[in-house]
């Protein structure tokens, strides 16, 4: 009854991985301090016809779990492998404190939750003192992928990766060609970092699709069934082919009942409260961390930031209603009927598809720029091709057509070379530029109808700003120099890069001012 892999945490992700790994023939020991949760998982294993229940063992004692590994394990030849699937922060510290005294030199602990990368590096240093490998690994795709094959981003030493590779490749989601969606990202906290930015991009994609659904429904006059059909057509072919969120979107829009909702003619989406909360503390989580990184790394990623802002505004409906009472401004208009003839409408829907593609592509570009910058700062040597490869299946930002577009371009670049994709890879700039008119048209509809579309707006404004040869920020420079002795450059004389300007004017001393 020797355990091959230990899982710590029997929630939806840990439980899913327990069943997945045992389905693939490994004997799994799953620990949880909560006896009932362990029992629930054991019952699930019993009921699951794809799983041999004899391969699933439940533990409520960490000590007993570690002892259940075969004798002789716990060294470089036969390290124990433990996968943590639990909330980030203090709970992981607690488990690390409990685990380290039980483990031996060479054992490997994989933290498979979302975690702030510096916390991972702190724990890696602590584990290293004892010769234990601590791997920070993003596991993406939600509980369903945990059960059937997630996309994974491990950050660890090369040695740990080499040992784990056959296991991880077996567990990972596979592309239709059979390639596993797991690769070594780099050392230290790089794996958790890439997962965090995956989630930042995920936020932007969620917002873009949610904003466009509202425009299609309320302003272009499509029912949710029609939007579902449209999303299905986008998912099947064209530049949004294989986009995971478009795919689950068209399925979700078809539901007429669910939860407490008995029957909603126009789909249950209309009955769901417009309030996006989060499981973790409001000051934490991958969305918050991603936007912090945008500021700290000085990378422009406004679609990711705007999406997170919308989530913040959305989360407290009570407060929002009070603010709306005070403001009393127009609400998004409720046209809800087709204002176009068939030909016009088909053309408009094509434009909408191109605009959504542009915004989704833009969010990828912004997220990849953050990863590149962090990789250079931290000397992680992350390959963008690797990121795209592991995101081809099993994760939330999977987007088949976009991956096919990016991959050959990234494979031409040595790891981490491009720091700004629109500067370094002209093909990417040209592709994004093709969506400009469509993005403008879609956002114009939002403006004219008082619709809320911050991620669509930020996607367009980003494109306008990075394309602009003369940004008019000269006036900002003037004012900054006026009050803050900030200095400015003279047009045409600017040094390259971020260097501060050479000139200053004592504006306050000018006569007549
Ligand atoms: C994934 C998801 C997942 C994510 C939550 C979203 O890749 O499977 O990104 O890790 O964190 O499902 O929840 P929050 O945004 O509320 O953290």
Image (cartoon, grey):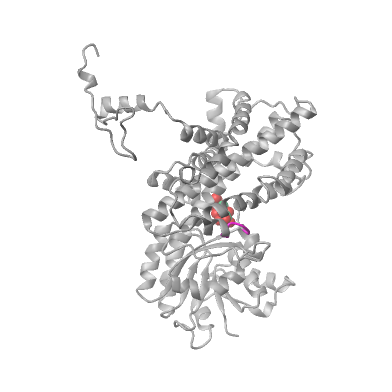
Q: Which SS type dominates the magenta stretch?
A: loop
Q: Which residues are magenta?
A: 390-394
Give coordinates of residue 305: x percent, y percent.
Answer: 49, 41
Along the line of sight, the residue nearer the viewer: 117 or 238:
238
Along the line of sight, the residue nearer the viewer: 53 or 361:
361
Quadrant housing the N terminus: bottom right
Is 268 drawn above or below residue 112 in the view shown? above
189 is within the stretch colored magenta = no
The answer to whether 471 appears left or right of 225 in the picture is: left
Is 463 drawn above or below residue 255 in the view shown? above
**Looking at the image, which residue is at 67% across and 80% down?**
54
Give coordinates of residue 62: x percent, y percent.
Answer: 50, 76
Give coordinates of residue 405: x percent, y percent.
Answer: 60, 50
**Looking at the image, which residue is at 53% across and 86% down?**
70
| Badge count | 0
Quadrant housing the C terminus: top left
**Looking at the image, which residue is at 31% across and 36% down?**
495
Q: Quadrant of residue 17?
A: bottom right
Is 435 drawn above or below residue 66 in the view shown? above
Residue 275, visible in the rendered structure: no
391 is within the stretch colored magenta = yes
Furthest residue to the bottom? 71
The answer to whether 483 appears left or right of 426 in the picture is: left
Along the line of sight, the residue nearer the viewer: 392 or 267:
392
Give coordinates of residue 126: x percent, y percent.
Answer: 36, 69
Furthest residue to the top? 512
Residue 366, visible in the rendered structure: yes
Is 309 drawn above or below residue 167 in the view shown? above
**Looking at the image, which residue is at 74% across and 46% down?**
232
């Amino acid at each position: 009854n020797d355990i091959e892999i230990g899982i710590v945490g029997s929630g939806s992700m840990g439980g899913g991985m327990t069943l997945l790994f045992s389905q693939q023939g490994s004997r799994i020991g799953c620990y949880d301090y909560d006896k009932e949760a362990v029992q629930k998982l054991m019952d699930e294993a019993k009921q699951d016809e794809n799983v041999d229940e004899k391969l699933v063992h439940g533990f409520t004692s960490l000590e007993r779990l570690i002892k259940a590994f075969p004798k002789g394990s716990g060294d470089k030849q036969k390290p124990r492998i433990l996968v943590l699937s639990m909330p980030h922060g203090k709970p992981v510290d607690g488990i690390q404190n409990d685990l380290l005294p039980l483990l031996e030199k060479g054992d490997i602990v994989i933290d498979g939750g979302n975690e702030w990368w510096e916390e991972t590096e702190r724990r890696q240093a602590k584990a290293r003192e004892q010769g234990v490998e601590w791997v920070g690994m993003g596991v993406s795709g939600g509980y369903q992928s945990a059960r059937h094959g997630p996309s994974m981003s491990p950050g660890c030493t090369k040695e740990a990766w080499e040992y784990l590779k056959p296991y991880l490749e077996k567990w990972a989601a596979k592309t239709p060609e059979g390639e596993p969606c797991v690769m070594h990202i780099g050392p230290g906290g790089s794996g958790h970092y890439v997962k965090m930015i995956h989630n930042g991009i995920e936020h932007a994609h969620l917002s873009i699709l949610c904003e466009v659904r509202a425009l299609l429904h309320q302003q272009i006059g499509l029912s949710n069934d029609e939007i579902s059909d449209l999303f299905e057509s986008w998912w099947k072919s064209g530049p949004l082919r294989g986009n995971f969120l478009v795919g689950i979107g068209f399925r979700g829009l078809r539901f007429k009942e669910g939860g407490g909702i008995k029957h909603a003619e126009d789909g249950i989406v209309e009955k769901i409260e417009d309030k996006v909360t989060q499981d973790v503390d409001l000051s934490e989580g991958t969305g918050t961390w991603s936007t912090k990184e945008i500021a700290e790394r000085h990378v422009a990623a406004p679609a990711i930031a705007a999406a997170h802002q919308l989530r913040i505004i959305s989360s407290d409906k009570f407060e929002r209603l009070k603010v709306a009472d005070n403001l009393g401004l127009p609400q998004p208009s409720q046209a809800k009927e087709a204002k176009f003839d068939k030909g016009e409408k088909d053309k408009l829907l094509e434009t909408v598809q191109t605009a959504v593609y542009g915004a989704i592509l833009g969010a990828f570009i912004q997220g990849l720029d953050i990863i590149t910058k962090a990789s250079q700062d931290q000397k992680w040597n992350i390959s963008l091709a690797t990121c795209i490869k592991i995101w081809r299946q099993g994760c939330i930002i999977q987007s088949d057509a976009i991956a096919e577009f990016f991959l050959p371009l990234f494979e031409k670049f040595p790891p981490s070379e491009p720091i700004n994709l629109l500067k370094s890879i002209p093909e990417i700039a040209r592709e994004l530029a093709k969506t400009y008119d469509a993005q403008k048209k879609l956002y114009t509809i939002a403006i004219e109808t008082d619709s809320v579309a911050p991620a669509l707006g930020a996607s367009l404004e980003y494109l306008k700003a990075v394309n602009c040869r003369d940004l008019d920020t000269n006036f900002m420079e003037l004012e900054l120099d006026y009050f803050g002795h900030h200095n400015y450059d003279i047009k045409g004389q600017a040094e390259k890069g971020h260097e501060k300007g050479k000139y200053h004017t004592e504006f306050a001393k000018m006569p007549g001012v």
